[in-house]
Amino acid sequence: MKFISVAIKDFKELIRDRRGLFMILLFPMFFMIIFGIVYGNMGQTNETYNLAVVNLDEGAKMPLTNEKVNFGDNLTEIFRDVEYEDSDVKLFNVIDTSESSANKLIQLKEADVMIVIPKNFSQTTVDKMEDSITAQTTGTTSSYNNSNNDTLKLIISGDSSSMGFGVSQVVLIKIIDEYQDNLVVNIQSQASGSSVEPLKLFEGDVESVSGTESFSQFDFLAPGMMLFAILLLATTVAASLTKEVEKGTLARLRISKMRSFDMLFGALIPWSVVAAIQVLILLTVSLIMGFNWQGGLNSILLAMFIGVIGGVGSIALGMIIASFAKNDTQAFNLGIMVVVPTSFVVGAFFQLPLVVIGEIMGRSFQIYDVLPWTHILNALKSVLIYGNGLSAITYDLAWSAVLTTIIFIVGMVLFSRFRLSAEN
Amino acid sequence: MVNEFIIEANNLFKSFGDFVAVDNLNLKIKKGEVFGFLGPNGAGKTTSIKMMVGLLRPTGGQILVDGKDIANADRLKIGICPQDIVLWESLTCKESLKFMGEMYEVPDDQLETRVESLLEDLILMDKANTLVSNLSGGMKRRLNLAMALIHSPEIVVLDEPSEGLDPQSRRVLWNFIRSLRDKEGKTVILTTHLMDEADGLSDRIAIIDHGKLLRLDTPKNLKKEFGEGDIVEIHLADSKMNQEVISKLKTMETIDSVTEVDGKINIRTLNAVGKLPGIMSNVKDMNTEIADLSLHPNTLEDVFIELTGTSLRE
């Protein structure tokens, strides 16, 4: 297991070069602090977001009372009425529209977010109520129920990189959560017989959503800064590998029994740890600077895991740069020339115009999606801004893993060919 | 049948664009000998060495290591101590040796013993746990050598190992090189600029220049070929007279050769002391004065200069 020896050697070199380590970890931190100061208060004005509602709900009759209800309409009214916390500014400007129109509105950036309420929304809710009541009155579990076990799906979509969608998504999820809570309470009270009143759910009782007062532009920049720090690793790795070439230590290793895999996989381990630590440090700094982090300890671990995948991609990029650079200064400069434009392209600082090149698994695939860091950024945003879990980022994680593997293989082939084989 | 030669270079050729670095080099290195590689700067020594250890691909020709083509040779057979100090500054001496041993797949039980033994032999035991960055130049040189030996190779290639060493460290190194040959039976290939080093250590010496092999023999035979005996060096007060004096001295039958080296007249002859009165008399006849005169036995350096000339190489 020579790669473990290489990893230990690299790790020792990394931690003993305190000045270098200090620079690697602190340089992105300064960026985060500056961005926090500059953008920390931006976007905190109570802006009303455009919400395209596609309400397909056909309504249903309530059990016991036979009253006709339409929860879709009800929910739409809530969206229309909801206001910022401690403010009378409406959160949403609701646009009732069809699904195709809603998609166009999103593409034209005339709507920040769209939500699709399915046609069986009310019926499914009513069926669940009936099942629950039957189960309560007969004392049995619902074996002959009306409803199936499918969960109602309210599809929220929009441009995942825009701040408007970010804020709207969080708020919509909170409203829907409250909707569900109210629904459960009503089902239970119906079943226990303590309430004979007709169900009157969601009648404007959600007036404001807590937490909505404090979103700033910095919240949407912080994951981008984390990604920038991860990408910067490529320059450090490239400089470090080129140093081995320049100092002749690589030639010494080349005539040993070490293989390219040992050298490069060994280097991968300590640098991946650095990537994970960087995410942790930057998250801490961004929280101090006022980042509205959603989620618990799991989201930190998940963000670190995402950081490691991004780090592996950066290390592979570093290998590619080191395959061509003649000395560590050239590697560093070349690295900056590659990393900075890449950061912009993947949307670390702001979103570039949409350039859709196809559709994969029902999702639009943009030209920027060929880079793993685009998916890394999406995943970091999803976890840290929206508090999503692993299931929500599977698509992006899978893409980033596949693309990172491709870049790593390319890096390994190039480095082996130009740096680890006999010179010509 | 056991092969007498451990390295064979057959028509070895290397060019970089139009520049020919090694020009059809043919040589055979015997098992268990110290083989000296001499040549001025840019003569093609390091290029030849790099090809012999597999770091550089030849443009033409073949290299056999213990009868096998270099591409298929066992890497454990060769250890190279490069001209530059090639070490990881942030590792300690012990860590560096242990790491290299692991890269050569030296078994753990042997590795510990070898590390201790090399540190002991190269007088680095006190610095075993010192970071390389904190070592003196001489210590780094010795560690550089130890790194080439951790896997106990049969062939040890030392590219100018004495560069920058003080006389004490040089002696430690020379004794160590002798012990590698005498006690462990290793083949040592040595490139050096120091003629006394090559003369004192090498069993055979190859002199190369412009990528070509000029001579390959024992130091004794090389010195004999270019004149046994002594060198008389005369510095005339008026160096413009050098060529006239050289012409006059060439008429003396008992003198082997007379050349001008660095503005001085260089006379090679047997029993120079006995011939000095005759030489002095001839110079006096030319009505010129001798500013300085020295006499020393013929050295390898004289042979080297004779073969490669005195023009500066870069």
Image (cartoon, rainbow, N blue to C red):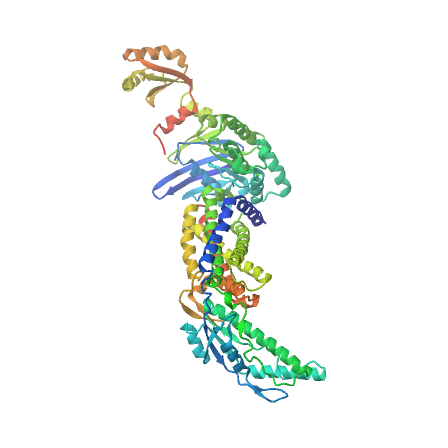
Location of residue A290 with respect to A52 vertically, above or below? above
Q: Quadrant of residue A66?
A: bottom right
Taking depth in this image into account, of B111 and A291 the one nearest to the observer is A291
Residue located farthest toward the bottom when viewing the structure as drawn:
A66
- Determine the residue positioned at 42% across, 69% down: A356
Residue A23, x across and y down, in percent: 48, 48
Q: Is residue B75 visible?
A: yes
Q: Is residue A145 above or below residue A30?
A: below
From the viewer's side, name the closer residue of B1 and A308: A308
In the rendering, at what x and y percent does residue A107 appear? 42, 73
Residues A203 and B219: in front is: A203
How many numbered marks are there? 0
- From the viewer's side, name the closer residue of A306 and A247: A306
The answer to whether any part of residue A145 appears in the image is no
Q: Does B31 appear above or below B225?
A: below
Q: Position of residue B2 (x, y in %)?
A: 55, 37
Q: Position of residue B71 (x, y in %)?
A: 49, 45
